[in-house]
Image: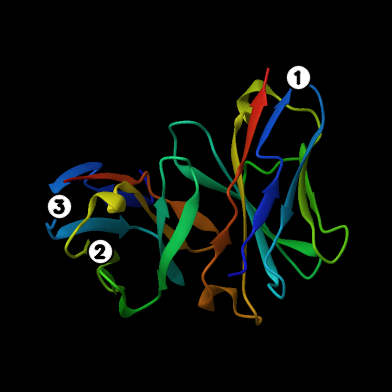
Amino acid sequence: EPEVTQTPSHQVTQMGQEVILRCVPISNHLYFYWYRQILGQKVEFLVSFYNNEISEKSEIFDDQFSVERPDGSNFTLKIRSTKLEDSAMYFCASSGLSRKPTSYEQYFGPGTRLTVT
Amino acid sequence: KNEVEQSPQNLTAQEGEFITINCSYSVGISALHWLQQHPGGGIVSLFMLSSGKKKHGRLIATINIQEKHSSLHITASHPRDSAVYICAVKGNDMRFGAGTRLTVKP
């Protein structure tokens, strides 16, 4: 069964460093998402991406964050200058075989645990 | 005020019991998701629904759009159902509930 993959599974970085979290969505999916979950808290939406541009973003997704689909398979989340409060599990998801994303379930990757020290 | 409220926060059941988890929301939505998060952190989508009822095996999800309420039912619960169950709604963006931690004892 197709699945969303994410690398690395765990990333440790120092405050102020840039990190790139990588995701390979399910082939033929058109909509891509990033979420985060701070330890012990609820999952939070960061951004959705369609047709090579951001379609929605939350107030969390400020100028420190960016997303990119550099080739036909990868979908990346970059944090330019990490802060301690960026420590969280980051989940990628993908959905949709047509232009109606709400019609399709989202498939989540296993997550990348980011630890900022 | 949370836009997505789940109840109960924690639920312990004996194997075989019928389980209900509730979700109420206060925003206009186009779809509601039920997700399962395992102890290791991985998230699995169980259902996405915008009206009525869906059933997968022992799981049933219902939604009442007028009342802004959804329920997730598990019939004949099993210890492997132990997980956190999360309700999420798609409005302008996705909003998540805090989750219901279910423990099913053998």
- Crowdedness of circle 3 by 10 Å Cα count: few (<14), some, many (20+)? some
Q: Quadrant of the N terminus of chain B?
A: top left
Name the residue type under label 3: Glu
Question: Is the C-beta separation of discs 2 and 1 under 8 Å?
Answer: no
Q: Nearer the viewer, residue A107 or B4?
A: A107
Whether residue A57 is visible = no
Q: Tell me the distance, in whole angstroms, between the alpha carbons under discs 2 and 3.
A: 20 Å
Q: Nearer the viewer, mark 2 or mark 1?
A: 1
Residue B54 circle label: none
Instruction: Say if labels 2 and 3 share a chain.
Output: yes
Q: Tell me the distance, in whole angstroms, between the alpha carbons under discs 1 and 3.
A: 45 Å
- Classify mark 3: helix, strand or loop: loop
Q: Earlier in the sequence, mark 2 or mark 3?
A: 3
Residue A64: x, y in percent? Answer: 77, 36
Describe residue A109's horizontal placement relative to residue B6 as left or right: right
Mark 3 lies on residue: B15
- Classify mark 2: helix, strand or loop: strand
Name the residue type under label 1: Gln
Residue A14 circle label: 1
**Quick check: B96 above or below A55?**
above
Name the residue type under label 2: Ser
Mark 2 lies on residue: B71
